[in-house]
Image (cartoon, rainbow, N blue to C red):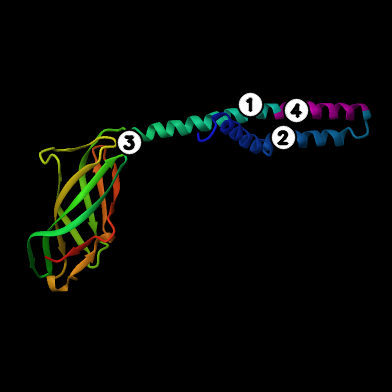
Amino acid sequence: MSGHPVREYVMKVAQFYKGHVSGWLLAIVAIGLDIAAAYFVDDPSKSAKVIRWSAWLTSAAAIWLVFVAQYDAWKDEFEKREAEEAKNLWPSIQGEVFDFMASGIRGEGGPPPHCYTGISCSLYLCNERAALTTLKELRIDGSRLQPPAEFSKINVVRTSSPQEHPIRLDRGLGTHCGVIAEISFNNFWEQIQESLDLNAIKVSVIDSFGGEHSLLVRQGEVFRKP
């Protein structure tokens, strides 16, 4: 909770209480008492009893709803805390991809026409939660490029420790990696633009639990023909 805990709790109880007061319990009590008052309208002694019972029942229901609202406030906080603890059981990986460069040899062939070349880029990852995990897979989807491209033979290496495999992702420790892959197009090289805006690609990593995490592509990243 933000602010003073007691004040926050009282406000939450008041919020739940307001909802219950306008709910079904007091409505049923009011309807029942209205029917009884109408039935005994010609009997002053019984009408007086109905009025007393009306006061008692309304007060009792109002007091009961205070306890119900307190329980609801406690339950709401308990469920939120449980949900937060459950989230921390699984990793949450943030990061970005940048510095794309064509590398290696290129080739083309057909029919159908196709061309390919090597490509490299840099990768930054950070696991924001306490759950220890490792990098299982990097996925790059170029289907939204114009023309569409396919990334394959993707290999990720930790910059500070190239022999580390799988790459370990501890909480709060930024990890810099190098990526090499192959990019291919269903077209000949002369049909490919001199530079392609790579902000249209989708990049994600798969952790050792099987969870998929979307990464950002740094603004202004382009692919230039080798």
Name which residue type carries label 4: Ser
Relative to 108, does residue 65 appear above or below in the rendering? above
- Which badge, 2 or 4, comes first in the chain's sequence? 2
- Residue at image x 15%, y 62%? 184
- Which badge, 3 or 1, comes first in the chain's sequence? 1
Name which residue type carries label 2: Leu
Q: Callout 2: 10 Å neighbours few (<14), some, many (20+)?
A: some
In the image, taking residue 83 as reference, residue 71 lies left or right, namely: right
Q: Which residue is mark 2?
A: 26
CB-based contact (under 8 Å), mark 3 and mark 2: no
Residue 36: x and y in percent read 83, 33
Give the residues in magenta. 45-62
Give me the C-alpha separation between circle 4 and circle 3. Answer: 48 Å
Residue 163: x and y in percent read 10, 39
- Which badge, 1 or 2, comes first in the chain's sequence? 2
Query: For residue 67, which numbered disc appears in the image?
Result: 1
Q: Which residue is mark 3?
A: 129
Q: Nearer the viewer, residue 78 or 119?
A: 119
**The C terminus is located in which quarter?**
bottom left
Q: Is residue 48 magenta?
A: yes
Q: Please count the marks in the image.
A: 4
Give me the C-alpha separation between circle 4 and circle 1. Answer: 13 Å
CB-based contact (under 8 Å), mark 1 and mark 2: no
CB-based contact (under 8 Å), mark 3 and mark 1: no
Residue 31: x and y in percent read 77, 37
